[in-house]
Image (tube, rainbow, N blue to C red):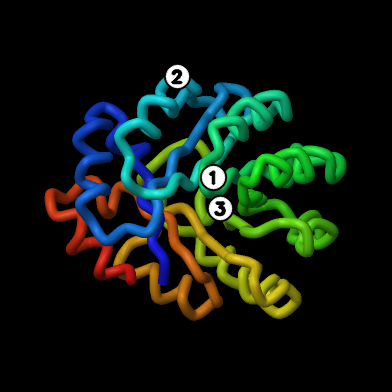
């Protein structure tokens, strides 16, 4: 299992958290970008992400909770490893093609209440699907177990090389549900960052 560490819950001690992730066995550093419109919160403006890039030693896994495709284009220019935006804001393939033209891997996130039918047209053109197992926008929420069935359904029809990731309420107990459903990667935040020993927590998830 690959582990992407979200530092949203450690936003007030960001540099410390990034350094801890750098020293750990984490596969990715996960940044939750919020525009205050798609979700109520506002975090990780582009200037902060540029600073993070300058100190992170891990590949970046950037999750955009934003309403505007213009914002997606702006963050794509930073060239993270993965740039994930929400299927709920998509109308066609144009933004996917644009991000891929920059050499950036494309992820599509899906909220707990959104049907996976919305993802299906894009599966052959993307690199990752990110299932939200909580309502997006706030760290520390409990894991919604009903999302597991959606993951299992998608796994049956997804291309073999598509990475299936899940984000929200992932800890040493819920990770077994993620593994059972067929996830290739988990995003975990407060379970890791609320503990001094990041690497110990990451190994519990792997």
**The label number, if any, that marks residue 132 in the structure image:** 3
Which circle, 1 or 3, is nearer the viewer? 3
Q: Quadrant of residue 177?
A: bottom left
Asked whether the beta carbons under mark 1 and mark 3 sit within 8 Å of each other, the answer is yes
Residue 48 versus residue 167 in the image, above or below: above
Element at badge 3? strand
Element at badge 1? loop
Percent x, y of residue 15: 24, 31
Q: Residue furthest top?
A: 47
Q: CA distance from mark 2 to mark 1?
A: 26 Å
How many neighbours does mark 3 have within 10 angstroms: few (below 14), some (14-19), or many (20 or more)? many
Please name the residue shown 60% across and 45% down the image. Answer: 84
| Residue topped by disc 2 | 47
Please name the residue shown 62% across and 51% down the image. Answer: 105
Percent x, y of residue 66: 63, 30
Which circle, 2 or 1, is nearer the viewer? 2
Percent x, y of residue 70: 71, 24
| Residue topped by disc 1 | 135
Badge 3 or badge 2: first in the primary sequence: 2
């Amino acid at each position: 299992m690959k582990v992407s560490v979200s530092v949203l819950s450690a936003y007030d001690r960001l540099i410390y958290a990034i350094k801890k992730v750098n020293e750990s066995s984490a596969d990715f550093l996960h940044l939750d970008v919020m525009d205050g419109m798609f979700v109520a919160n506002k975090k990780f403006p582009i200037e902060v992400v540029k600073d993070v890039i300058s100190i992170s030693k891990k590949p970046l896994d950037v999750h955009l909770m934003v309403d505007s495709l213009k914002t997606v284009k702006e963050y794509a220019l930073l060239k993270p490893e993965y740039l994930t935006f929400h299927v709920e804001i998509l109308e066609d393939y144009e933004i996917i093609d644009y991000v891929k033209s920059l050499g950036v891997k494309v992820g599509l996130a899906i909220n707990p209440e959104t049907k996976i039918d919305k993802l299906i047209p894009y599966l052959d053109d993307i690199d990752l699907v990110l299932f939200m197992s909580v309502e997006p926008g706030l760290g520390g929420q409990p894991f919604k177990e009903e999302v597991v069935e959606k993951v299992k359904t998608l796994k049956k029809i997804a291309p073999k090389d598509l990475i299936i990731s899940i984000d929200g309420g992932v800890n040493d107990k819920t990770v077994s549900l993620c593994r059972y459903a067929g996830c290739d990667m988990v995003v975990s935040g407060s379970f890791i960052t609320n503990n001094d020993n990041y690497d110990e927590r990451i190994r519990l998830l792997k």
